[in-house]
Image (cartoon, rainbow, N blue to C red):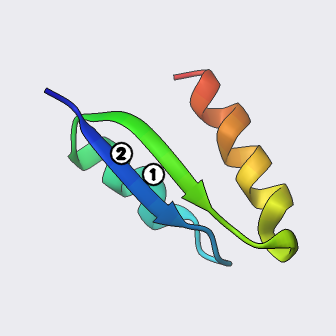
Amino acid sequence: MGYITIAPISTNIDPIYIGIKEFSTERIILLCNNEYSNEANKIKEDLKKI
């Protein structure tokens, strides 16, 4: 059974990766505003590799 993680995006994205590693994450939902949309897209592309 995997978890669904809801993660707000801010300047420090390391906790998102730590949470994915610590919990069996099945799906992740990234929350951001326009200011952090580039970071959200970067995380999205990184997660496709996993």
- Distance from Cα at disc 1 to Cα at disc 2: 5 Å
Q: Are marks 1 and 2 in contact (CB under 8 Å)?
A: yes
* Residue appearing at x 36%, y 51% in the figure: 5
Q: Residues within 10 Å of mark 2 (few under 14, many from 20)?
A: some
Image location (x, y in percent) of residue 26:
33, 30
Is residue 37 left or right of 30 when viewed as pictured? right
Q: Amino acid at mark 1?
A: Tyr
- Identify the image quadrant of residue 44: top right
Q: Position of residue 18 (x, y in %)?
A: 36, 55
SS class of the residue under badge 1?
Answer: helix
Residue 22 position (above or below residue 12): above
Say above or below: 32 vs 16: below
Of 49 and 37, the residue lying toward us: 37
Tell me the kind of residue under disc 2.
Ile
Which residue is more in the foreground, 33 or 24? Answer: 33
Q: Secondary structure at mark 2?
A: helix
| Image position of 8 with respect to 21: above or below | below
21 left or right of 24 in image: right
Q: Quadrant of the N terminus?
A: top left
The answer to whether 19 is drawn above or below residue 9 in the figure is above
Question: Label 1: which residue?
Answer: 17
Q: Which residue is mark 2?
A: 20
**Any mark on residue 35, and which?**
none
Residue at 22%, 35% in the rendered image: 24
